[in-house]
Image (cartoon, grey):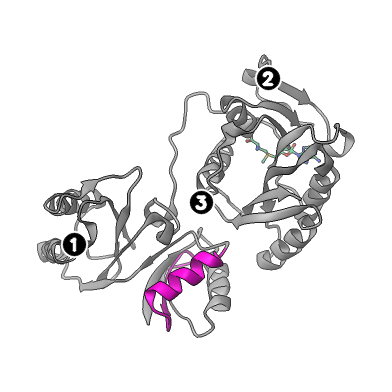
Amino acid sequence: MSRWIGTANHGFASYAMEELRRLFPSIKFQQLVAGEVFMLELPDDREQALKKVQDNEPIFLRHIHPVDRELPLNGNADDLQELSNMVRHACKLFEGKRTAVHVRRVEGSPYPYSAADTKAVLDAVLMEVDSEQSLQHPDMILSIFAAKDKLLIGWGTPEQLLSDWPGGAVRFQREEGQISRAKFKLLEAERTFRINLAEFREALDIGAAPGGWTSLLLERGLLVTAIDPAELHPSLAENPRLTYLKKNASEVKFSPGQFDLLVCDMSWSPLQMCKLVLDLQQALVSGGSAIVTVKLMHRKPLQTIREVMSKMNEAFEVLRAKQLFHNRDEITLFLRRK
Ligand SMILES: C[S@@+](CC[C@H](N)C(=O)[O-])C[C@H]1O[C@@H](n2cnc3c(N)ncnc32)[C@H](O)[C@@H]1O
């Protein structure tokens, strides 16, 4: 038996739960934050459950952490004292490791300390066992969730927790002159799918305007062809590595294998998007990669995704399908051309 806290993008928890129920038919859920965070109880032990989740990673499950310990909440200084004692007892797990402390709370939790104060105290406890505080590339994450009546505490590697950010909420710094928030989606896909964009030579960006994705691809040193009937941001106009076709994607043709990367973020009907991408697949070299967002337009996202994946399968192998933190009503696919 094991217990876990699962997190999905706001409004998508029920789909994450549906995916989890398929993996673990006798799973039991309890809601912690409406539409977003839930507790799950499984008959499987921790290792079996982790393996199943990693082998069949649910699209809508952004983050998961085991509940290894529980502490009742008093709503006073004892809470932090008891948490510190608990971590001190468990500290062998973190010995000599780079450890990040993640703290989240539900609204109305009586736990009286901020995330920053909790982290400061626990970092000091962890330093006693020669564990180095590391937010960027931790080996281990100590996750604390302050619920309404208790602290739920668990630990694991970033791979086991599916993210190295608290609750999988990846934050990127907004840059000066950034063209669109959409850029964060591609940055997150690059991290989550472990893609090194700089390794590609030439990219086709379908539905490129105003140009957030195009700007990132240019920053990574690629040649880019951007297609969109809408205007690209003027800051991109002079870039010698950019070709801009102010057209509908259904009107363009390219030589076979011209590109080794295709990206598409069209916010359009998913099946139309599929058709456009499949019509342009020849432009992508065999073995080339594609990153596409799939808009979830109606109420049955899992069915839409199944249909899109089965269509895409005609020409692509689906390497990953994930709702990223920066995806709104959509998911992101990482594909390889067959
Ligand atoms: C969400 S925006 C793309 C944002 C972009 N990824 C960025 O980072 O700035 C969607 C774009 O897709 C374009 N689009 C929709 N249908 C298209 C089509 N058939 N051909 C080309 N572009 C299309 C729209 O004009 C719009 O600019």
Q: Nearer the viewer, mark 1 or mark 3?
A: 1
Q: Which is more N-terminal, label 3 or label 2?
A: 2
Q: Nearer the viewer, mark 1 or mark 2?
A: 1
Q: Residue at x 39, y 50 (%)?
A: 165
* SS at circle 1: helix
Query: Which quarter of the rendered image does ligand 1 occupy?
Result: top right
The quarter holding residue 290 reads top right
Q: Which numbered dot is residue 325?
A: 3
Quadrant location of residue 321? bottom right
Q: Nearer the viewer, residue 74 or 201?
A: 201
- Left/right placement of residue 211 relative to residue 324 reads right
Q: Residue 325 or 285: which is nearer the viewer?
A: 285
Q: Give how far across and how far down residue 64 sits, in percent.
A: 42, 64
Residue 313 falls in image quadrant = bottom right
Name the secondary structure under disc 3: loop
- SS under mark 2: loop
Separation of residues labelled 1 and 3 (CA atoms): 32 Å
Q: Which mark is residue 92?
A: 1
Marks 2 and 3: which is nearer the front? 2
Sequence-earlier tag: 1 or 3:
1
Q: Is residue 39 magenta?
A: yes
Task: Answer left or right for 197 relative to 205.
Answer: left
40 w.r.t. 59: above or below: below
Q: Label 2, on which residue?
A: 241
Q: Amino acid at mark 1?
A: Lys
The residue range painted magenta reads 34-58
CB at disc 3 and ligand 1 closer than 8 Å: no
Depicted 331 relative to depicted 232: above or below: below
Task: Please give left or right for residue 27 compared with residue 22 in the image.
Answer: left
Q: Is residue 26 above or below residue 196?
A: below
Point out residue 200 in the picture as x, y percentages from the top left corner: 64, 33
Q: Quadrant of the N terminus?
A: bottom left
